[in-house]
Image: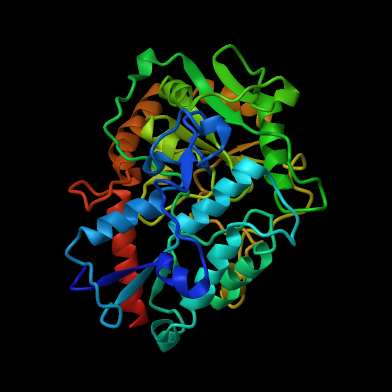
Amino acid sequence: MNGRKIYVLDLGIFAEQQGMPACNPDTTFRVDPITNVPFLHDDPQVKNAYLPQYLGQYSGPWHLAQAIRGSPYVTTDLDAADIVYVYDYCYYTWWLSFVHSNGRVQREDATPGDHLLKGYQALIQTPRWKRREGADFVFYDPHPGFGTGRAEMPVLDMVCNTFRNAMHIVAERTQRNGFQMKVTPLNERHILLWFRTKCLPYIMEGQGRYVNGHRFCHHVAIALGKAGIDVDVSCTDRQLGGRPLPFRSIMERMRNATFCLTMPGDSASTRRLSETIMAGCIPVFVGPPYASMPMAEHVRYRDFSVFFNVSDYSGWLQDKMEWGIHPSIRPYHVLNPWTWIPELEVTDVAIKVDNVSSIAGHLRYMDKKEILHKMEVLAVERQKFSFQPFVTGPFSAINIIMSSMCNISRIQT
């Protein structure tokens, strides 16, 4: 870290000034133990049974804030800080919880997203932000928004324009808080390939950006759903005869599978990659496009994953995709939220197949030595996906993120 100091700027400090209600992550929302996602604290479906908020899928920012505050790199002097970590976790998750509890609302309707927006507006008016136009500020991830409420487009505009000089960590949006989970030996795993997904798009075609991800998942689930008794792939939508599984059951099935499909969903992030890796299941990336690979500079994805390049992707993409982006126009694409940019070059290691249906056959006849090698690498690398509320001895996600924050600070100095 070379003496770099980090200030944790909680958006809650602007609450009184901006007329924002106080937000406490331990009381404002609760985590459903079945889906592992947050809902409003008074939502009846999680009223009597819930997990602590720090075990939720989106609590990575909380773990990072706790780790910074407990480290020797923290400072309480905002002006003297080399890096300012914008801790927007509570208000952002409050907005997300509202959507989970109430569904999508009209653009003109107020939501907790309005509180988040007010916090951001106050943030950019501070002398510390104006000093370098946010170049030494860090956000956990570039919030994609939820397609709901009047704050949606203003928040997206701020992320893509006002915050363009800041650093966005873009770690996997889900998190897990331990890598000591037992890994099942290969000879005890009875599932070849595992995958569960929500298939039906909740925004109709032509009305939003979520359709292709769900179309992709649906196409793969249907193609592989009957690929053999050792393949456990299906949709969770009740309209398609499926059902969601409790989180405990999901992890148990992943631990008993050799391979787990890794697919993009609402966004490039799978939100299940962390669970796959923690369970010791070999990720199978299917593309184009491939799901996001967080911390790609630090994680050996090429060595422990399997990549399939499907020639016929007409089932989920209507247009030909350009895989190379010229350096002169890359900055525009990086700032454009609708553009997908691969984090890692995998063309040379991807297995080329004509269609999705043939994937199970390739995995079934993969050399056992190759599978064992991938499992060995995965066993070492999975600690990098562990989120702990402190800096760890073994290199974890928190260590990687804090190191990245300091590296970007040195570049910008």
In this rendering, would 116 be left or right of 204?
left
Q: Is residue 164 in sight in this rendering?
A: no
Taking the view exactly as shown, the residue that stands out farthest to the right is 206
Q: Position of residue 160 (x, y in %)?
A: 59, 71
In this rendering, would 346 be left or right of 237?
left
Q: Position of residue 255 (x, y in %)?
A: 40, 23
Q: Position of residue 354 (x, y in %)?
A: 69, 35
In depth, the one of 80 and 316 nearer the eye is 80
In this rendering, would 119 be left or right of 64?
right
Q: Residue at x 69, y 55 (%)?
A: 148
- The chosen color scheme is rainbow
- Give the total of numbered labels: 0
Q: Residue at x 41, y 48 (%)?
A: 59
Q: Residue at x 45, y 25 (%)?
A: 254
In depth, the one of 142 and 256 nearer the eye is 142
Q: Which quadrant is the N terminus positioned in?
A: bottom left
Q: Position of residue 321 (x, y in %)?
A: 70, 56
In this rendering, would 154 be left or right of 119?
right
In the depicted structure, whether residue 158 falls above or below residue 189: below
In the depicted structure, whether residue 293 falls above or below residue 220: below
Q: Is residue 147 in sight in this rendering?
A: yes
Q: Which quadrant is the C terminus positioned in?
A: bottom left
In depth, the one of 244 and 179 nearer the eye is 244
